[in-house]
Amino acid sequence: MLNVLLFVASPALAEEPAPFFARESLFSTDAVAKDKKGKGKKGEGKKKDDDDDDGKMGKILGLNWEPYVAPGGGVQIDSSGDMAVTAGADVGIRYWKKKLEGDLYAGAAYITAESLAGYDVHLGDQTGYRDTYWGAGGGLEVTYNGQSNILTGKDILAPALGVKVPVEVVVGPKQYYGKAGVTPAWYFDESRKATSGGAVPLGDEFEWHVKGGLKIDNFKGEIGFAQLITPVGTYNTPTLSVGFNP
């Protein structure tokens, strides 16, 4: 869910935070088939390899769906050892049809340290394929973020609009799993552009992450590690997120 993760850690090194929300759809419901007396029986009547169970909120345009809320945060540490605290939340809709799964979400996050404050507002969608023990997907996210020095009131990182392209693979059943992904980002403000020949492997900023997750009933928790590579520094972020779908 909480695809939750974020920003920079010191006023001397200001860039956009590594995302910290887990956002791929890993929820499903049990199929219910009726017996001759009209009583529902769990797990009966389901065809082999058919994951097209009814969503808790019914269907929209033939897709099962259910809403979710995913708060989370982390502690970001830059190469000099400076730390910043991030916190935020995503809300969204998970949708699926057989082995197709998707996630339409919106969210915001905040970062704070001794002398800086920053924010990130985003809207995105991810879609992919989820089999019994593995999955893969990608998507597009529009983000708007910035940072300022809270002591002087000046911008450290001017507010900028950008586009991220998250790509992720998942291994394991839906109840407990591991995943890894990369997210290159491009910004429309020239001050956020990476210089040619720099350390960023793709885009103006580049983030990679690994996570482990556990789902119990309507709750899902994830713990992981992310690294954000920017033209002026590298930032490491241990992350924790908790999600709930009503």
Image: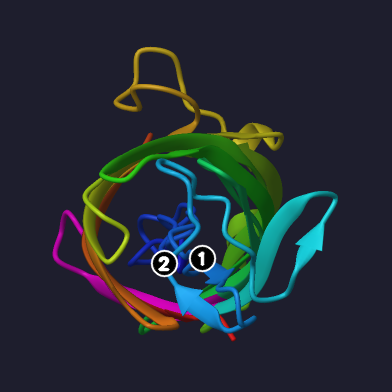
Look at the image and tell me in which quarter the C terminus lies: bottom right
**Callout 1 touching callout 2 (CB < 8 Å):** yes
The amino acid pointed to by label 2 is Gly
- Tell me if residue 100 can be seen: yes
| Crowd class of label 1 (few under 14; some 14 to 19; many from 20; radius 10 Å) | some
Where residue 139 sits: x, y (%)? 59, 37
Tell me residue 182's x, y (percent).
36, 37
In this orientation, which residue lies closer to the viewer: 153 or 22? 22
Magenta-highlighted residues: 70-89
Left or right: 172, with 12 as reference point: left
Task: Residue 74: say if magenta.
Answer: yes
What's the distance in space between the residues labelled 1 and 2, CA to CA?
5 Å
Tell me the element at label 2: loop
- Amino acid type at circle 1 is Ala
Label 2 crowd bin: few (<14), some (14–19), many (20+), radius 10 Å = few
Above or below: residue 221 compared with residue 46: below
Residue at horizontal 50 percent and vertical 31 percent from the top: 204
Which residue matches tag 2? 43
Does residue 26 show up magenta in the picture?
no
Residue 149 seen in the figure: no
Looking at the image, residue 155 lies above or below residue 151: above
Residue drawn at (43%, 59%), measured in percent from left and top? 26
